[in-house]
Structures are given as structure tokens and as C-alpha cells.
Amino acid sequence: MTRRAAAWLLSLIMIAPLVVLSLLSVAVQWRYPSLWPSAFHHRLWLDLLHDGRALGLAFLASGLIAAAVSVLATVGGLFTSQRVARHRRHSALLRLAVLPFAVSPVVMALSLNYGFIRLHWAGTVPGLILAQTLFAYAYATLLLNSLWSARMVALSNLAASLGASRRQLWTRVRLPLGSAVIGVCLFQTFLMSWFDFALARIIGAGRVVTLPIKVFEYFGSGDLRLAAATGLLLMLPPMLMLVLNRKGLAWPLAHEASA
Amino acid sequence: MRSSAARGMPDPWITVFLVATGGAVLLALGFSALYGLGLIGTRSSGLTLAHWQAVLTDRGFWTALGFSLGLTVATLTLCMVSALAVVLLLAEQLRRPPLGILIYLPLAVPGVVAALVAYQVLGDGGLLARITHSLGWISQPSEFPSLVFDRQGLGIVLTHWAMVTPFFVILLDRLMDHERIPAFRQLARALGASEWAALRRVILPLLSRGALPLCTVYGVVLLAAFEVPLLIGARFPNMISVEIHERIGQFDLTLRPQGFVMATLYLVILSAAWWLGGRWLPARGARR
């Protein structure tokens, strides 16, 4: 009974951020010390839509940048992970994939920004895509490494020995067998970019406005209601994944445990 | 078609990978080192060690690094202890709704939104202050202990704790299954071990072995945390990423090279830690 109560309490804590953001986004007045907003109105969401041009552009920019990063990183990671898996320095290469994260993407971005400015890539969408892809590609290579199991290699060899071309090997054997992991990789690299604030702020230089940057701007200007509504928009894709396939959202954790 | 390796040339994908990972880190290190030495940049005036001297003798960098380390250790400890308690006490509840589903919810909250929620909950006019007010413990917001923009970094620790603990719960729960820990625990108890001895001699060693790599990854992520300390951290002391960001981004261009010196030091220290960690931690590939 106590454990059930503890589980319910913990569940409430887990859902608290969503509740707080939702309330904040529709609260007309929520003055101290009220525990509950005194009035609600969905007009605030309509205001958000009317601020549409700026927010719509941020939503579109975030979506397009994340889609580009996700596809580039996953395709690159797919081919690279295959070469890494059969490389004699397999372990050292995998450790190298961790290096950009180990030395902090923020500090790396601050240092590399000098090069981006000199090449006039700072403050541009392609520049931000390139910066985010650097990290997403390393992550995709790590994540897709699990694809090249003994079974995958044996099936690829079997298909090749039966006369499959390189193209057929990919389209008939490798991609169908690895579709689940590739899907997770596409989604997770999408999320890396979708959630990214640091690189968007540093490399984007205030000229590439994405959703996390909008949340920061609204927060900084004290408009917590718009910040909360934008934050909810930001949480939309992962929430969708949570409903459809929550294991996909936490895939590396599951993999880490069973590796 | 002959492969690149067969022709004695490096594989193009491996080359791209080396450039995108090690190459990018070396490039970052190169830019920040040259900037810190006064050799490049808008106000470069030729080789100088003045910026290095300023950073190495000033407390700013070491305070920020120490503060980040302290908060990282505190957060990781809190996360591990609370995740372990949840997994050991609520194992059954973690397998069915609502907890089995909602434990994944914090994974959908990005850092910038977590900071916003933390401000709304932990601030002196926030939800916790309102609850304590309604309980009659405080009469005005200023009586509520400062949990955001505080110099102790309590708000940062609490926010990261709330963000990261569910990850650890999911990981430890999977490890419990994978390492068959409940069976070993039962065996230890049947052989006469106390609950505490079973935890200390059986459960913790098995879990720590599996959780160590991810713990290290999160340690590095928390050490360089950016969004949360930027939004709800105090002006001083800063976490290291925010300190470097502010030095490089500030209006006084004469101080900018000091930011790059800090970046160089941080990149060198963390690269060395990564190299040592690679030798110390078992490689993922080798564990298979």
C-alpha cells in the first residue's frame, strides 16, 4: 500500500513539469500566493499563433534543421559505423566518437566559432546544420555500431555469395534488418538538433532562431506564458514518441544495459 | 570494384569520421590556443603570454571548474542514490502504468524548458514557496530559501537531479533484469546474508559495473552543463561552460582571449581525462 502510494506520488512528480507548463500557458492571472491560477483563457495560445510569423518561422527552422541534421548524421553514421565495426582499431575508433561530447559541445562550439565566423558560416542555417551534424554524426556512428552484429555480417556475406550486388545488399538485407535501429537513430539525432540550445545560440549567433532560442528569449523578457507555450511545442515530438514507442526514446539506456 | 583499403588508401568514411571527431577537437583546440596566445582574433597583437598569466593567476577559471565539479558530484550522487532507492523499492510499480510510462516523461524535457519549470517551481514566488505559504511556514516570498540564482547552485543541482534521475532509474531497472539481480539477491538471502549485506556485496557491485560507463557519460555532460546554469544560475560562481561563454561573449574585447585560454585549458584537461578514461574503463567493444 505504501509502495503504491509512493509510486503514485512519483508519477505525479514526473508529470509535474507538463502540468506546470500547461497551466502557465493558459493562466491569465497566477499571482503569489495562489496555488492555482485565478483565470484561464486559451486566448494566450491564440496570441502565440498571432505572434505566428516569428514563432512559425522558428518552428519551421527548427524542423528543417533537425530533419537535415538527422538525415545527414544517420546516413553518414550508417556507412561509417559499418567501416568502424570491421576496422582493426574498432574500440579506439568508438572511443574517438565519444571525444567531442567528452570535451563539451559548448566549449568546442565556442572555439570553432572563430572558424565559422571567418568562413561566414556563423549565423547561417547551413553553418548551424554543419555544427550540429558534427555531434549528431559521432552519436549516430556510436548508436549504429550495434547494427553490425555477427548475424548481420553473416547474412550480408550469404547474400553476397548468392550474387547480390552492393545496392541489393543494402536495400534487401541491411536496411530491412536494421530498420528499427535506423529509425531510432533518425529520431534521436532529430531530437538532438530539435532540443539544441547551445550550438543554436553560439553558432546561430542570434540570427538563426529556433524554438529553444524562442523559449530563452521569452524567458529572458519575462513573458513566462509564451515561454511555457513554446516549451510545450518543443516537447511535442518526444511526447509523440513516448506515446508511440517509449523504448525508442530511451533506446541507448536499454542498449547500455544489455551491451 | 576494389575497396579503398585494398588499393592501400584510407577508407573515405573512416577519414571523414577522423576529421569530424578528432579533427574537429584538434581544430577547436588550435583556434582557442592561438587566440589565447594573441596570434589570431580581432585585436591580436602578436605572441603574448599575458592572457595565460591572467587566467592562471586569477581564481575565475579554477573557481568555475571546482564549482562545476562539486555540483556534478553532488548531482550524480543524488541521482544514483535516489534511482537505486526507486528501483529497489518500486521494482513492481516500474513495470506497469502509471509509473512505468510516466518515468519516461522527463526524457522529453529539454534543458531550456527544465530551467523554465525550475524557475516556476523553485523560485521565491514559485510553486514550492506558495505551498509553504499555504501551510503557514512562511508569510512572504523573501522568507523562502533562495533556490534559483543562488550562489550554492542548489537550483542547478535540483533541476539536474530531476532531469537525470529518470534516466538512471530506467538504466538500473534494465540492469536489474539483465544481470538477474533479483535472483542473486534471493540466493544471498537464502544463504543467510542480511538485506544490507546482500545490497553491499551483491547488488551494488553488479549494478555499479554496468552503470559506470553511463555514469561517466552523465558526469561529463553535467560538468559542462550550459542551459540550466545560464538560465537559473547565479552570476558568481559560474559553471565552467557559462564562465567560458561569458568571457568570450562579453563586450570588452580585451578580455576575450582569456575566455579562449580557459577553453584551451578545459579542452586539454577533458581530452586527458577522456584518454585516461579510455584506458581505465573497459571499451564497449571489448566487453562484447
Image (spheres, coloured by chain):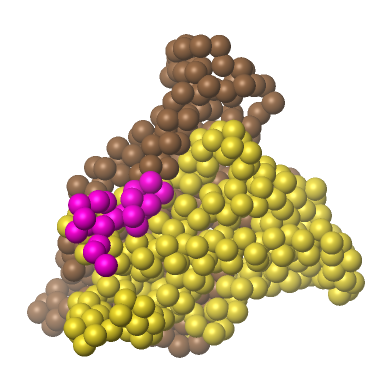
Chain colours: A yellow, B brown
* Residue A18 point in image, percent of width and height: 66, 71
Q: Is residue A249 above or below residue B156?
A: below
Q: Position of residue A62 (x, y in %)?
A: 66, 61
Magenta segment range? B1-21
Query: Relative to the observer, which residue lies in front, B260 or B99?
Result: B260
Say left or right for A8 vs A221: left
In this rendering, the count of numbered labels is 0
Q: Is residue B136 left or right of residue A145?
A: right
Q: Which residue, as the protein is rendered here, is positioned at the far left?
A: B191
Query: Left or right: where does residue B225 sit relative to residue B14?
Result: right
Residue occupying the point 66% across, 28% down: B250
Outermost residue toward the front in this view: B1
Above or below, B143 against A248 in this view is above
Residue A58 visible: yes
Q: Position of residue B15 (x, y in %)?
A: 33, 50
- Image coordinates of residue B64 in percent, x first then y, are 49, 33
Q: Residue at x 86, y 75 (%)?
A: A42
